[in-house]
């Protein structure tokens, strides 16, 4: 449907700057039946139970497009430890309701054998409109992720930081990759979710804008042509969350391990604060050509921790885990300042021990059938151990 574009003035897009680099975490979980290990559309029942037993927690447990999904959301936190403590408190309360229901929380990017056409949609005009527009691809979005917000104190820092963060996209995706199986098959990818989600309009990699005015023009064009009605319909892998004054990093697959999420949250917090400090020091942040960014995303999605990534415009390449070692060393002073040295150091443990996609494949042992994949589901749910 065409819109009457006219000659509308370009509106200012306000960014409610955060005075401190606060963080917030959004963690999506699928609901699985403890006996069958299949997805169950019981989010409504779960929400009712949480509201009755824990009315103080209920505002931090959100619905998503599918009724098999819940999202737990922290408050505005000062550091990784505070955010993870908030998540632990929320999850413990959710489990008080889900356990008697015979429902487990499944934290991975995809479910290994559930069928997309058996899932029920949440009643919401926003989701109805999304499905009406995207059709088959929208219904395929049987995926879960983790989003991390970091506060930024000035609008003009947001886009340079986002562009520079793209250099570290493959590190974050490889560490969190947890979606090797989908619809009863091993896809051959470490992160099927990353490839699936970018099929939606306005999803995928962000444009590398240099000035806020360019972003405002983009928003104007998107609204004028009917692509979006609201800023939150820009579903980039990293985006400005203007109403919160944060950069929202949406790269990561759903994560099964509380300890691994803690490490990745610390890494993201340190990265944003590090890049922010470099801007304050007058540095021009390094960026990669968009075609290299796109290739690095694909390599990390395909090969995970075995990805060889492109490091610069001169086409130098390096194994992502080797590059990660140097990155952790660079970030160590920032981690000390933020009080997350222990958590950041644990990032190296993921690379040494293996990421979730590797552990899932080890459980499956190369056998692709429902019984084996039920074992995969149970291995994932068993990893959600709270401190």
Image (cartoon, rainbow, N blue to C red):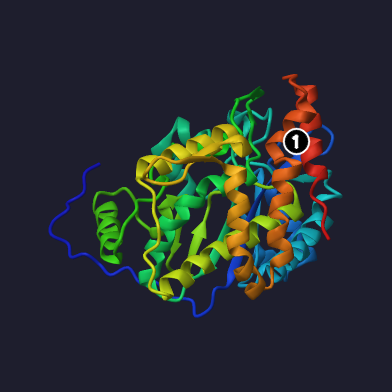
Residue shown at 59%/40% (left/top)? 143
Q: Is residue 217 visible?
A: yes
Q: Is residue 144 visible?
A: no
Left or right, 280 with reference to 7: right
User: Does 84 sit above or below residue 199?
Assistant: below
Residue shown at 84%/57% (left/top)? 96
Left or right, 263 with reference to 308: right
Q: Secondary structure at mark 1?
A: helix
Q: Residues within 10 Å of mark 1 (few under 14, many from 20)?
A: some
State which quadrant residue 328 falls in.
bottom right
State which quadrant residue 314 falls in.
top left
Residue shown at 28%/49% (left/top)? 226
Q: How many marks?
A: 1
Left or right, 250 with reference to 204: right
Rendered-image quadrant of the N terminus: top left
Rendered-image quadrant of the C terminus: bottom right
User: Does 372 sit above or below residue 262?
Assistant: above
- Residue linked to disc 1: 359
Residue 282 image point, x, y percent: 38, 73
Residue 126 image point, x, y percent: 46, 50
Viewer-nearest residue: 260 or 99? 260
In the rendered image, the residue lying farthest to the right is 100
Residue 164 image point, x, y percent: 43, 57
User: Does 279 sit above or below residue 217?
Assistant: below
Viewer-nearest residue: 302 or 319? 319
Viewer-nearest residue: 351 or 156? 351
State which quadrant residue 307 falls in.
top right
Residue 356 image point, x, y percent: 71, 40
């Amino acid at each position: 449907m065409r819109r009457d574009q006219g000659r509308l003035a370009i509106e200012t897009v306000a960014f409610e700057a955060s005075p401190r680099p606060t963080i917030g975490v959004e963690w999506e979980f699928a609901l699985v039946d403890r006996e069958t290990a299949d997805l169950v559309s019981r989010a409504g029942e779960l929400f009712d139970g949480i509201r009755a037993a824990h009315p103080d927690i209920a505002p931090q447990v959100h619905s998503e497009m599918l009724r098999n999904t819940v999202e737990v959301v922290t408050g505005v936190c000062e550091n990784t430890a505070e955010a993870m403590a908030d998540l632990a408190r929320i999850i413990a309360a959710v489990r008080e309701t889900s356990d008697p229901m015979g429902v487990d929380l499944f934290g991975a990017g995809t479910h290994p054998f559930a069928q997309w056409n058996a899932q029920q949609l949440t009643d919401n005009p926003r989701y109805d409109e999304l499905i009406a527009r995207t059709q088959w691809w929208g219904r395929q979005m049987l995926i879960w992720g983790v989003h991390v917000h970091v506060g930024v104190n000035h609008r003009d820092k947001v886009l340079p930081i986002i562009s520079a963060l793209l250099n570290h996209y493959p590190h974050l995706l490889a560490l969190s990759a947890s979606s090797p199986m989908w619809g009863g098959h091993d896809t051959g990818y470490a992160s099927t979710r990353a490839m699936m989600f970018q099929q939606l309009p306005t999803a995928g990699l962000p444009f590398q804008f240099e000035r806020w005015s360019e972003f405002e023009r983009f928003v104007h064009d998107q609204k004028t042509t009917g692509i979006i009605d609201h800023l939150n319909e820009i579903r980039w892998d990293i985006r400005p969350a203007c109403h919160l004054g944060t950069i929202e990093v949406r790269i990561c697959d759903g994560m099964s391990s509380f300890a691994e999420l803690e490490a990745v949250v610390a890494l993201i917090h340190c990265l944003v604060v590090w890049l922010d400090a470099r801007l304050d020091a007058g540095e021009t942040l390094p960026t990669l050509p968009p075609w290299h960014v796109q290739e690095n995303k694909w390599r990390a999605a395909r090969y995970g921790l075995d990805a060889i990534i492109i490091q610069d415009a001169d086409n130098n390449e390096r194994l992502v885990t080797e590059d990660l070692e140097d990155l952790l060393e660079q970030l160590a002073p920032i981690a000390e300042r933020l009080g997350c040295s222990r958590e950041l150091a644990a990032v190296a443990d993921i690379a040494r021990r293996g990421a979730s996609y590797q552990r899932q494949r080890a459980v499956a042992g190369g056998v692709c059938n429902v019984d084996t994949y039920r074992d995969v589901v149970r291995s994932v749910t068993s990893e959600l151990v709270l401190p």
